[in-house]
Image (tube, rainbow, N blue to C red):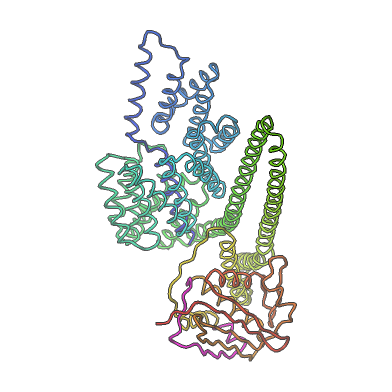
């Protein structure tokens, strides 16, 4: 699983770089164009380097030199910065600093680019120049992407997108929506990726630039390959190639050939995969982008491995490995080591294959932990950005009200000179309006405080669950694997504890699913995809998932669900609702107990009942089940653990699907959960 995700990383990074490099005319042509303009200015009799026109053209020339003439870019950026400071030309200074941050992004330490970008963003005059502001947020977002800091990348791109929306800048609307789509493609969140790509397509239509449409088609093709829609991906690639070849856009042709190589790799057509990866690699000879070259070499190595050309596969992957080591790129190292393990295993080099397997598993474990931390931080970044946006709206509204109040006072003062009596009446009216506004503002502030408290509580709950309920099983697995590898008797212990570890890890996976879906329910704007669902088919599938737990506790399942009963709901959320309910019923039902599942049509709803003969609950416990202010969790009859999150998630999803949930229970009498969802009558 990690290998697939890592494989995608550098290709997506290349998509950012190509988009940054793209301009309306070819980059080399742009350099020639601005060199010619500067030459014409210098030939004018009254030429002076102090003019803003000269500084602007020097900055433009520097920007287009960022990929193929980086030494010249450094000289020109520093000269533009020097001239801007001498002439107190703020815009020229900001552009020059942004160009230097861009240079460090592509040809220098990424941290240096981040530090310089943050200094530019703190400049108070930056907001006067929205294009420069969007450019520096885009550079900073890419720098954080290079550092695998996706929450920070997401935040910076959103800042740029917000400015683009305010200024109706179609190019940056296209650019930032495409970058955000690429980020969520990297995070394997296809729904979010498609949402931003759709917005980028809308902007492309308004720009009416076929090359940008080709860029979108190329990125969409990559996403469709990941989703398994290979025919659609090939159609997009064919159209993109036609456009890019007509316009001779080498940057995106290189990216698109690498995507085509990936397409053939998925088809196991290794000969064509090699041909297209090699084309992409040849085009990269003129680009200063070593990480992407390393990943293309990785693709070539996988294709050679597919053809069982082990010497060539090994030689190619070793070149890729050297680059990954030099750039401290752990994700690349993991996939390279995994490939070397496979090569040596086929060659029967047992010692070497085990060495690379050990390196792979260590990096895989580390990267998996990083991914979990990253996903939780990404969720927190989304919530924080939404809160910041709401706070900013409130501040703007407050400032607008204040300005309106000043205007009213001014008009009132002017009117006082005309009619004293009329002023007194108006003053009383204004006092009432002001009191009402103050009361409204107090209510808004109180609501904002409650929202902030809820966000903090959500965050604390997330990290509490991760720290207490997920960490233990993973640490146990780590310990038993270390014992297995280092202790001569480790195999005996491993076989003894493996069944329990399997159950613990299945519970970890179930908890992680609940965490991530619960996080989505807390976000504003999360959508559902309603469709007709066969209730019996879905519940039979869920019961099959829990067959081992049911058998272990000798529980009898009385399945009375009618075969022709369907509901309208989001299929994924329907499964989450009843996985949690059935899981709880099994957990709190003693050995040899009974669980009954039944359905009946009531008006326009289908009533689905999950009834158990378990330990039951008091009225007080029922009140706590769906509480957002306190955590309620109990151990099952066989000491099964819980997080207290599942039933809150169930209620949120039932409501989101226009349904209702009712709980009936008595201690030692069992519990009954009644779910009503819109019925689909065939």
Image coordinates of residue 571 in percent, x first then y, are 47, 72
- Image: magenta residue range: 547-571
Q: How many marks?
A: 0
The answer to whether residue 540 is left or right of residue 27 is right
Position in image of residue 50 (x %, y %): 48, 15
Splitting the image into 4 quarters, where does residue 416 fall? top right
Q: Is residue 555 above or below residue 102?
A: below
Q: Against 365, is 410 above or below?
A: above
User: Does residue 13 appear left or right of residue 483 in this picture?
Assistant: left
Which of the 4 image quarters holds residue 414? top right
Quadrant housing the C terminus: bottom left
Q: Is residue 568 magenta?
A: yes
Expressed as whole percent of the image width and height from the top left, the position of residue 538 reads 47, 79
Q: Relative to 228, is 152 on the left or the right?
A: right
Picture coordinates of residue 78 (x, y %)? 50, 23
- Considering only vertical position in the picture, is 435 above or below 590? above
Q: Nearer the viewer, residue 12 or 348?
A: 12
Quadrant of res 44:
top left
User: On the picture, is 342 further left or further right than 484?
Assistant: left
Q: Is residue 323 magenta-colored? A: no
Residue 611 visible, this angle: yes
Residue 318 visible at all: no
| Nearest to the observer: residue 333 or residue 143 | 143
């Amino acid at each position: 699983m990690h290998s697939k995700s890592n494989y995608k990383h550098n290709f997506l990074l290349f998509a950012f770089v190509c988009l940054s490099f793209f301009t309306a005319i070819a980059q080399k042509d742009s350099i020639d164009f601005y060199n010619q303009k500067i030459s014409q200015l210098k030939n004018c009799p009254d030429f002076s380097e102090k003019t803003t026109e000269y500084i602007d053209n020097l900055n433009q020339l520097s920007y287009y030199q960022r990929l193929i003439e980086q030494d010249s870019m450094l000289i020109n950026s520093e000269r533009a910065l020097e001239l801007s400071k001498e002439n107190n030309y703020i815009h020229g200074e900001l552009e020059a600093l942004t160009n230097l941050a861009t240079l460090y992004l592509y040809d220098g330490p990424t941290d240096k680019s981040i530090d310089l970008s943050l200094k530019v963003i703190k400049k108070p005059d930056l907001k006067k120049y929205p294009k420069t502001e969007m450019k520096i947020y885009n550079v900073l977002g890419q720098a954080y992407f290079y550092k695998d800091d996706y929450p920070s990348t997401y935040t910076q791109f959103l800042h740029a997108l917000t400015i683009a929306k305010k200024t109706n800048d179609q190019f940056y609307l296209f650019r930032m929506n495409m970058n955000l789509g690429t980020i969520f493609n990297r995070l394997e969140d296809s729904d979010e990726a498609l949402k931003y790509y759709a917005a980028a397509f809308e902007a492309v239509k308004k720009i009416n630039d076929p090359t940008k449409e080709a860029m979108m088609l190329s990125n969409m093709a990559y996403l469709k390959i990941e989703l398994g829609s290979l025919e659609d991906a090939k159609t997009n690639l064919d159209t993109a190639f036609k456009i890019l070849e007509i316009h001779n856009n080498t940057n995106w042709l290189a990216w698109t050939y690498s995507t085509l190589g990936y397409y053939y790799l998925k088809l196991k057509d290794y000969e064509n995969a090699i041909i297209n990866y090699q084309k992409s690699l040849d085009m990269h000879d003129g680009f200063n982008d070593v990480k992407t070259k390393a990943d293309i070499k990785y693709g070539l190595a996988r294709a050679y491995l597919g053809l069982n050309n082990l010497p060539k596969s090994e030689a190619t992957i070793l070149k890729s490995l050297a680059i990954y080591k030099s750039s401290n790129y752990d994700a690349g190292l993991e996939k390279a080591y995994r490939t070397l393990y496979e090569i040596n295993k086929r060659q029967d080099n047992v010692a070497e294959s085990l060495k690379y397997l050990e390196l792979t598993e260590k990096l895989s474990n580390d990267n998996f932990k990083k991914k979990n931390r990253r996903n939780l931080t990404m969720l927190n970044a989304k919530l924080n950005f939404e809160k910041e946006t709401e706070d900013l709206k409130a501040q703007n509204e407050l400032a607008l009200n204040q300005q309106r109040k000043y205007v009213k006072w001014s008009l009132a003062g002017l009117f006082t000179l005309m009619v004293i009596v009329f002023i007194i009446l108006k003053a009383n009216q204004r006092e009432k309006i002001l009191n009402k506004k103050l009361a409204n503002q107090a209510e808004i502030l109180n609501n904002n405080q409650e929202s902030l408290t809820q966000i903090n509580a959500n965050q604390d709950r997330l990290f509490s669950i991760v720290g207490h309920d997920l960490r233990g099983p993973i640490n146990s697995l780590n310990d038993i694997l270390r014992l297995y590898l280092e202790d001569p008797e480790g195999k005996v212990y491993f076989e003894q504890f493996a069944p329990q570890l399997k159950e613990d890890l299945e519970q970890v996976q179930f908890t992680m699913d609940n965490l991530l879906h619960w996080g989505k329910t807390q976000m504003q704007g999360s959508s559902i995809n309603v469709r007709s669902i066969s209730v019996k088919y879905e519940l039979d599938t869920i019961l099959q998932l829990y067959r081992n737990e049911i058998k272990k506790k000798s529980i009898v399942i009385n399945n009375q669900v009618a075969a022709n009963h369907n509901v309208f709901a989001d299929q994924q959320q329907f499964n989450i609702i009843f996985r949690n309910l059935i899981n709880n019923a099994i957990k709190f039902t003693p050995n040899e107990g009974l669980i009954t599942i039944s359905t009946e049509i009531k008006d326009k709803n289908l009533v689905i009942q999950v009834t158990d003969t378990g330990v039951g609950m008091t009225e007080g416990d029922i009140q706590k089940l769906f509480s957002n202010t306190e955590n309620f969790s109990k151990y099952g009859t066989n000491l099964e653990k819980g997080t207290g999150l599942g039933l809150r998630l169930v209620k949120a999803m039932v409501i989101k699907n226009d349904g209702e949930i009712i709980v009936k229970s008595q201690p030692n009498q069992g519990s009954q959960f009644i779910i009503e969802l819109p019925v689909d009558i065939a």
